[in-house]
Image: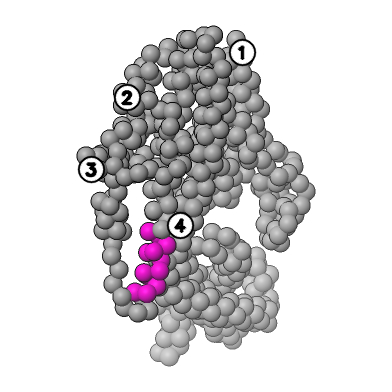
Amino acid sequence: MDEDLANPSNGRKGKEPTTSCLENNLTLTLDGLHRQVDTAATIRVDWAHMKGDPAFTFGNPEEQVIIVNRILRAASVAKEKIVRLASSYLLANKWYAAQVDSARLSEWSQVQQKTADISEVMPMANEEAKRLSTLIKEIENELQKAEKNVYEAKFHDKTELYKRVAYTLQNRLQEQQQDIHALTLQVRELESKAQAKKTDNGEMTDTMENTTASKQMQLTGLQVQVECETRRVQQVYSGCDDKFEQDHGGQKERSDFERETEECHQRHVSPYHQQVYDDYYHESRRKSTEGPISDPDYFEQMIAEVKTYSEDEPEPMDEDHDLVLENISSDEGDARDNNEEINDETWRRRRLREDLLQMENVLQNFPFRKIGESSRGVESWVKCAFCRRVGQHCSDSSSEVTYGDERYNIVRHGGLCKHCLDQCPPDKCKFKPRRCWYCERIRGIIAEDIMPDDGGHHRALCNVPNARNTLRRRIEDIRRQLNG
């Protein structure tokens, strides 16, 4: 029989429990009641922390439903246990008071480490049950909102995804247009230098012409990429419109593959431009060692499609292509043969100049850490992991310790999790998949090797913001090599 029903059952049968048995039952029940009160307080703190956590607020609706359900179940179980233990304690206390005198009852109450007076225990249990009831209602309302978001997200996920893809492609398109403009200026400058020194130095003229041809091939390849990216943006926007019509009007859309295939079949490229595209592709594959996205694969597929139709009648090129390619030799193999004649020293200096330009650009946009005694918008419960101040600033802005490596050692020696700066098992931390904001700013570029290889960390522990001088030293080293 359950221990909560043992004493009432014995009383019904006329069996009275002994005094020591009642004292033991009262002690265990009182201890369990206080533990449940502490558990209820922990649940309230966890819920307050969860409501202010961006990972929960901006997370997927499905994840929100799971988390809210867990907290709701814990709160409901805690309330039930508090009510059950309080009722059991009240019954056992009345039974014990009827068997012993007031002196022994007072003596037993004084022995207990926690409050054992029935006049104080019952109000405490009642107050905690009321708090849990209020918390349960709040959590149930939040659960209804999360379930509603799950239902609505099914109709908006694809449209939002298309919009994000279109936004990304537009940004990439703008960057490539800027590269085209920069390469056009470089081509014109190299052509003017080659023309000015043509009579004085034949070898220098050949080098300039070869470099000019290479720049022109890069420019042509970038223009082709821009056309492809423009087409992809149009396809994404078209997909958004077709998705809207399909949800509201029942119209069936053609797949992106069918539209892309039809556009490729309608496109005709001359044999010479086919060779230029092919040369640029191999040149770009030699320079780039690690692409952050799958654009090279997409560009290779586009080149293959262009080669398939290289035997068709050539269409007249527009004025922009004629302006850029008017000085390229009509011989299809001249650019490739001239590139092979450039010596290793020329290529080395060229790569150094390219690295220098990339590093200077990275240095201008290098992420920095904002240090201060206070941070705007910090919740009142947020505690800094390094100075232990509450509600003043986040851990990343702490002025007590500003270097990422020193912060990492403090967290490691303090037994804290490197993902959430709290006391939780690192392999089970729910924030482990979150990426560092500073590392993401330099991922996929020439300064990517500065990122610490520690399997992920909280942004407050990152040492990337402290590596600005390292990047400056690299720039100075490249400048010395170019001037040497």
Which x, y percent locates residue 365?
63, 39
Q: Which of marks 3 and 4 is in front?
A: 3
**In this picture, residue 431 sits left or right of residue 330:** right
Labels 4 and 1 touching (C-beta < 8 A): no
Looking at the image, tell me whether mark 1 or mark 3 is earlier in sequence order. Answer: 3
Q: How far apart are marks 4 and 2 (CA)?
A: 39 Å
Q: Mark 2 points at which residue?
A: 331
Q: Is residue 244 above or below residue 102?
A: above
Q: How dense is the environment of label 2, judged by Cα within 10 Å: few (below 14), some, or many (20 and up)?
A: few
As rendered, which of 241 and 199 lies closer to the eye?
Answer: 199
Residue segment shown in magenta: 235-246
Q: Mark 3 points at which residue?
A: 312
User: Which residue is found at the position 30% from the left and 54% from the top?
Assistant: 263
Q: How far apart are marks 3 and 4 (CA)?
A: 33 Å
Which x, y percent locates residue 385?
66, 47
Q: Name the residue under label 4.
A: 166
